[in-house]
Image: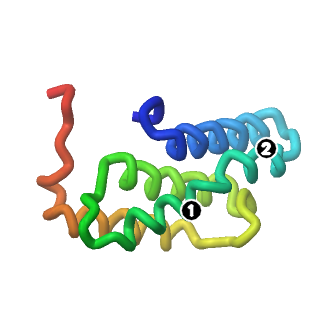
């Protein structure tokens, strides 16, 4: 999925860099993470504010990854947003799509 969505790919790279820094007990590469995620929030906000646009799996994965990144690295972003906020956004997205039944797996 991340190969087809540049913002999700960048978020995955930021998550990986943060995780690697934690494992190696190195400082987080804050500048690199900032560059990777600079377009993630505006793009997600634009997608969610368009009532005619469908909520894609990539949008849902982005909100979930944001929550996960905030859990492992609460200071990864310039502005601190509690992970619960990202999780609430993901929950609202699932409900807007019709509930849990709307999340389909292609590998079944």
Where 56 sits versus 2, above or below? below
Q: Quadrant of the C terminus?
A: top left
Question: How has the structure been colored for display?
Answer: rainbow
Query: Which residue is painted at 65% across and 52% down in the image?
Result: 37
SS class, disc 1: helix
- Residue 5's tag is none
Q: Is residue 54 left or right of residue 22?
A: left
Q: Which percent across, then down, holds residue 16?
A: 65, 36
Which of the 4 quarters of the picture holds residue 49?
bottom left
Q: Which percent across, then down, holds residue 1?
A: 39, 34
- Residue 41's tag is 1
Mark 1 or mark 2, which is nearer the start of the sequence? 2
Which of the 4 quarters of the picture holds residue 38?
bottom right
Count how many numbered circles sit on residues in the image.
2
- For label 2, count other residues whose C-alpha is less than 10 Å away and answer few (under 14), some (14-19) or many (20+): few
Query: Which residue is painted at 71% across and 61% down in the image?
Result: 77
- Circle 2/circle 1 CB separation < 8 Å: no
The single residue placed furthest to the right in the displayed view is 27
Q: Which percent across, then down, holds residue 57?
A: 31, 47
Which of the 4 quarters of the picture holds residue 82?
bottom right
Q: CA distance from mark 2 to mark 1?
A: 16 Å
Query: Which residue is painted at 69% across and 55% down in the image?
Result: 73
Where 9 sits versus 69, above or below? above
Q: Please state which of residues 33 and 39 is positioned toward the viewer in this rendering.
A: 39
The single residue placed furthest to the top in the displayed view is 107
Q: Which percent across, then down, holds residue 21?
A: 78, 39
SS class, disc 2: helix
- Residue underneath mark 2: 32
- For label 1, count other residues whose C-alpha is less than 10 Å away and answer few (under 14), some (14-19) or many (20+): some
Query: Which residue is painted at 60% across and 58% down in the image?
Result: 71
């Amino acid at each position: 999925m991340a190969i087809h969505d540049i913002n999700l790919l960048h978020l995955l790279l930021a998550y990986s860099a943060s995780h690697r820094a934690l494992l190696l007990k190195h400082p987080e590469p804050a500048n690199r993470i900032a560059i990777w995620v600079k377009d993630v929030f505006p793009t997600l906000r634009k997608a969610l504010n368009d009532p005619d646009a469908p909520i894609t799996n990539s949008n849902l994965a982005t909100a979930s990854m944001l929550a996960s990144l905030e859990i492992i690295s609460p200071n990864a972003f310039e502005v601190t947003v509690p992970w619960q906020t990202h999780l609430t956004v993901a929950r609202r997205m699932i409900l807007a799509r019709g509930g849990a039944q709307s999340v389909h797996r292609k590998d079944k």
